[in-house]
Image (cartoon, helix red, strand yellow):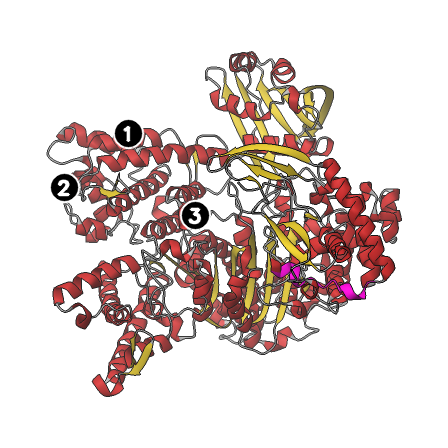
Amino acid sequence: MKIDVPAVRKCLKQFDFKTLFREQLGWDNHHAQLDIPVNGRTVSLCAIAQKRGFVAFICEGQIPDRPTRLKLDHQITKSAREHFVIYADKAKGQQVWQWVRREQGKPLASRDHRFDIRQSGDFLIQRLDQIAVDMDEEENITVVDVAGRARAAFDVDKVTKRFYDRFKTEHAAFLKLIKGFPKPQKIDGKDVPHPDLQWYTSLMLNRLMFVYFIQKKGFLDGDTEYLRNRLKMVQQARGKDKFLSFYRYFLLHLFHEGLGKSPDERKLDVAIEKLLGKVPFLNGGFFEVHELEQSYPDIDIPDNAFEKLFDFFDQYRWHLDERPLRADNEINPDVVGYIFEKYINQKQMGAYYTKEDITGYISKNTIIPYLFDTAQKKCAIAFEPDSALWRLLRDNPDRYIYPAVRHGVIKDDGTVIPESALPDFVRKGMPDPKARMHDNRYNLQQAMAEDELRLVTETWREYVYRRNRCLEIREKLQKGEVRQINDLITLNLDIWQFARDAIVHAEGPELLRAFWDAIIKVTVLDPTCGSGAFLFAALRILETLYSDCLERMERFIEDIADKPHHPEQYSDFKKVLTQLAKHHNERYFILKSIIINNLFGVDIMEEAVEICKLRLFLKLVAQVEKVEQIEPLPDIDFNIRAGNTLVGYATADQVRKAFTEEITGKNIQSKLLLDSAEDDYKRFEDDMLIVKKTFQQYRDQQTTDGGKVTHKDKLDLRKRLAELDVQLDLILAGEYGITLKGYGSKAAYEQAFIKWKDSHQPFHWFVEFYGIMSAGGFDVIIGNPPYVEYNKIKKEYTVRNYNTENCSNLYAYVVERCLNILCENGRTGMIVQLPIVCTDRMQPLQKELLEKSSSIWFSNFDDRPARLFDGLEHIRATIFLTQKEICNTNMRYSTTYNRWYSEFRPKLFEMLSFTESSDFFMAGTIPKIGQKTAKMVREIIAPFAPLRNNFTSAYKSVSVYFHNAPQYWIRAMNFAPYFWNERNGEHISTQVKILSLPSKNDAAIIVAALNSSVFYWWFLILSDCRHLNMREIENFPLGLERFSEAAKMQLIVLTNDLMRDMKQHKQRKHCQYKTTGKVVYDEFYPKNSKSIIDKIDTVLAQHYGFTDEELDYIINYDIKYRMGNNDDENGDDE
């Protein structure tokens, strides 16, 4: 709806909210008053309008402070779950529009939008436009729709996107003003800036954003406008762009000398030193002379570039604390991550911004199980079946069942909500499948908002399933049946809370020592880290566990303080706490220790690596309140690295072979007799041991020896690494055919080698992370690898020696690489595309995963009606979690094919449900089973003969037609659907495929079976859920020969009824395509024929021998989405 902007602005400035809502925004009258006691007084709020139960309140008088407003909102929620409040001052000069975001497991986030009558109000008016309701929408709009609009309008993601849009413009403008780089390159006829110029532009903006954050805390000479004022001072003293620019005269000195070196190392003349003022030494490698600044010594940037950029930055308030953004002009470090993900055009790179619910789910379900496995090896007695550790689950089971699962089932006091609290039809249907099977109230009626029993959008069928599952899990816990950490993954329990409680309530110091040792040593890697989303999730988890360990150490020491004890008792705990006490800020030291010792990342994009480090640095600086408390930032250049994860030697075995075997094409021969290659390898290994020792000293210096490392220390380490890298680069290039012999001349060879290295960016894991790789590999690997078809990057670089090469997608290669650099019994978890579990092309990757895992969990997600990655199409996804172990037997678990509405997203991961499905794997598919009833159905139909047995290639056959791109319904017919286009006339659409059957009766039975809900279920559990391929049809266990004659006749009659009904409901559609011109086709709507399809399933249930429970499951499988208002189902091609 396009609102009348002048009229809306007038209403806002006159505080005429009734007219605003009722006449301008299309809301309805509402009269109610709430009197809420708060802070010793009563605050009155009047409801002025509502739309489908979403209420707008006005509170006039004094505008309360934010904590008071949150208290009020808590009380308002009891009367109106969905609402917002307008606070207006008595003088009618200011307004605060408050909307509160509620997400499960997170604190309330208040989104406050301030309006002053002296302002234009444009930003607020843009928000109001999104919640306006047109008359054309009136009939179909629901409270869910209104709530969704309010969220889109008032949530801070919009602010972030707005900042990014402007940032992109300023980035481009800043780039054009930088001098000293090669001229633009011609690519596809367009001038494209040199890659190094683009890189340096990002580097400068990253540095400047960092400085903006810290200057606003007063850390730079106590001046919150430090950069702007220094620019003015330089121009006043020397003139604008005279002699030397602001960039060359001041900024480089600030970066390289001021922030990059300790005061005693700085070499500055008196004038520059005075201009810099008192600035802290930050270290971190972020401000040292960059390799681009070494390669291009003549870089210069004019003053006006900074003037324009500072004008942009100064429009925002920069803050480092971790509270939610309170205004539409605030920027915090989270925005920086978003900017990176958008700026570097990750969609083209095949990576997508990964939200916290995804990173958190994967991280906690990999890191924590690894810590438990490691601790158990050192303190096995604490993990005995009836130990105090597992009794935590038995004694307080509700603590570990997620709130979303408990909601409406178990009260806060632990009592179960009785069935008598449920509606009559629900109580009737719960024990009786026949009573609920066709009851639309039970199967389709959704909760428009979260109520006392149901979650938002939940049907009664879903509630009952959740209720039964919740009580079943609770009973397992109460009986003490959960005694393995993997069980918490399978049952989807709150594993993070359990880990914290295991530490806080550790009965003996041995268990605490075991956990502490595991935590401080665990190595967590994201091999395609981007801006660090997964590393931040890991940091959050490890920080809490680290802090819990320190707290428990203190309590152990306190317990013996007043008792006789040996001086050495708990000496290790005392040493840790003494080390901690040396630091001004405990949290800063904890985070710094984790970042240095536990977190590692690699990305092919240099800019990604730098922004990741920037965000980690900002996280640290955010902990500091006073400038004198600043400690040197850690240098994590050796933790977060740039390079190609897929190209390079990863393991000791690969490096040994590189030295001792010569590879020419596909032939391998020993080099031992030719050039003493084994001796070369031993010398290389000796050099690596020296580097390993140097690495450890470098890390220790930063955490235990005062936190200071010199520039020389770093250069020495880099030099040693570079020498080792060059050796391996030369050998690897030879495997790619880059040899002196092959190129003839040394010059040609060197040129080819440089070109190969630039394009392939080899990263030798065995060298870059030698200490970790020589110990067996990384402990935990997590991430979101790029979803890019191999043929799209093959011109840039190629990969070698991957078992998964025929999978032809980079994410498959990343997963294989990860399994090779993961330690034995290590854990890995990643989010990838859905085809990993359902396409023949991914069989090599499935083989890698299944053969190298003792336990593996697959959770599967649709992209309709909502999706995990916002703003993207066709991004169905799978998350896998795995424990690496080479074994003959393994446990395999899967979820159903999860679908949800966007309002349900905050509950999604708490509601995942796994079922063990090891017995049902087929070549190319890992079934999406998810529920016990589904498992029973799969077992029952397994013995029936596959449909392929009934096809014929005879000349005289009967055709069955099916559409090969279903979403919610299969469309199979005994006639060819009408299709015509301007270019070719009438013909069969290319999306319609044909099966050949020996008789008309057989064809009718097959048509019935393919349209059934049981086949639709089969299609979803095995396929990519978008393409109906012959594999799913051929393998469908129908058992045609086992049908009774009566059942056959029933299906033949039902097929005729179904075809007639589908024709009756069809619509003839017209559209236009560039290639074929006008297109006319018949569109079919099988959901209108659901009653006939149910009869088909009833006949099939008798054929298979289903119980009423199993038939009810099939008939109502995915019913909420199949019978809902879904996307167009047909979409024929040209």
The image's mark for residue 308 is 1
- Determine crowd level at label 2: few under 14, some 14-19, many 20+ residues with C-alpha closer than 10 A: few
Q: Which mark is residue 355?
A: none
| Tags 1 and 3 touching, CB below 8 Å | no
- In depth, the one of 345 and 568 nearer the eye is 345
* Amino acid found under the numbered disc labelled 1: Lys
In the image, taking residue 654 as reference, residue 386 lies left or right, namely right
Residue 710 shows in the view: no
Give the structural element (helix, strand or loop) at label 1.
helix
| Res 270 label | 2
User: CA gap, disc 1 to disc 3?
Assistant: 31 Å
Span colored in magenta: 1031-1043
Tell me how far mark 1 sits from mark 2, CA to CA: 29 Å
Q: Position of residue 231 (x, y in %)?
A: 23, 32
Q: Which quadrant holds the N terminus? A: top right
Picture coordinates of residue 937, whole percent (x, y): 75, 62
Q: Which numbered disc, 1 or 2, marks the residue closer to the eye?
A: 1
Q: What amino acid is found at the position of numbered circle 3 in the picture?
A: Gln
Q: Earlier in the sequence, mark 1 or mark 2?
A: 2
Q: Which of the two discs, 2 and 3, sits closer to the camera?
A: 3
Mark sitting earlier along the chain (2/3): 2
Q: Residue at x 16, y 42 (%)?
A: 180
Q: Amino acid at mark 2?
A: Val
Q: Is residue 618 visible?
A: yes
Query: Which is nearer the eye, 778 or 750?
Result: 750
Q: Secondary structure at mark 2?
A: helix
Please tell me which residue is depicted at 24% across the width and 88% down the height of the picture.
Answer: 673
Specify few, some or many for label 3: CA neighbours under 10 Å numbering under 14, 14-19, or 20 or more.
Answer: some
Does 403 lie within the magenta span?
Answer: no
Residue 1111 placed where, x, y %? 81, 55
Q: Which residue is mark 3?
A: 623
Label 1 crowd (10 A; few <14 / some 14-19 / many >=20):
some
